[in-house]
Image (spheres, grey):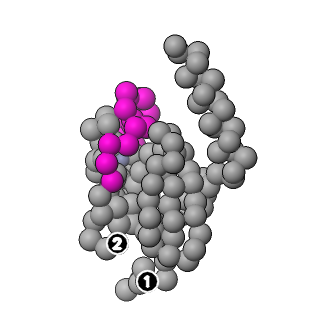
């Protein structure tokens, strides 16, 4: 048995911007990633593919759907994971703490990147109106 006890657990999850998700961890770290990175890290079989006989098969999640990178809800699954509910109706992704922490570390944004994204979002907002 591998214990997950050694993995930090998220103590707070927030959305500092409509396109960002931020995690505060039990070890004191705070990581912010884009919702896009969070969705792309979805560990479910239809996103990640299933490994059958050493080959990985994916099932057509390459198509971009409206609401795909829009988070509707997050709920706790026991005390070991969270489940993300996306606005395109996808909700089979269960992020255990090790997967979550791995994605948060891999895609963590610097303050500078967060600022650049905010500027970009503001510009796109202006361009649309
Ligand atoms: Zn998925």
The residue at which mark 2 appears reads as: 80
> What x and y, as percent, mark residue 66?
37, 27
Element marked by disc 1: loop
Mark 1: give few (<14), some (14-19) or many (20+) Cα within 10 Å.
Answer: few
Q: Is residue 4 left or right of residue 72?
A: right
The residue that appears at 51% across and 42% down in the rendered structure is 17
Name the quadrant of the N terminus. bottom left
Query: Is-magenta flag for residue 64?
Result: yes
Give the left or right position of residue 12, taking residue 115 as reference.
left
Q: Position of residue 81 (x, y in %)?
A: 35, 66
- The answer, for residue 68, to whether it is visible in the render is yes
Within-10-Å neighbours for mark 2: few <14, some 14–19, many 20+: some
Main secondary structure found in the magenta portion: loop
Q: Tell me: is circle 1 under 8 Å from ligand 1.
A: no
Asked whether 118 or 78 is in front, the reply is: 118
Residue name at image x 28 percent, y 51 percent: 92
Residue 32 in the image, given as x and y percentages of width and height: 57, 54
Q: Quadrant of residue 118?
A: top right
Asked if residue 53 shows in the view, the reply is: no
Mark 1 or mark 2, which is nearer the start of the sequence? Answer: 1
Q: Where does the magenta region start and end?
A: 57-74
Quadrant assignment, res 12 = bottom left
Element type at mark 2: loop
In this rendering, position of residue 57 left or right of residue 8: left
Find out whether the residues at labels 2 and 1 contact each other: C-beta distance under 8 Å: no
Residue 59 magenta-highlighted: yes
> Of the numbered discs in the image, which one, if any, rests on residue 5?
1
């Amino acid at each position: 048995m591998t214990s997950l006890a050694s993995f930090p657990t998220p103590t707070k999850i927030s959305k500092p911007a409509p396109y960002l998700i931020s995690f505060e961890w039990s070890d004191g770290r705070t990581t912010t990633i884009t919702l896009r990175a969070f969705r792309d890290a979805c560990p479910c079989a239809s996103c990640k593919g299933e490994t059958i006989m050493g080959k990985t098969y994916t099932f057509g999640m390459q198509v971009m759907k409206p609401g795909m990178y829009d988070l509707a809800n997050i709920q706790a699954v026991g005390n070991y994971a969270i489940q993300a509910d996306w606005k395109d109706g996808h909700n089979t992704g269960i992020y255990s703490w090790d997967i979550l922490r791995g994605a948060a570390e891999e895609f963590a944004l610097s303050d500078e990147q967060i600022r650049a994204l905010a500027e970009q979002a503001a510009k796109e907002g202006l361009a649309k109106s």
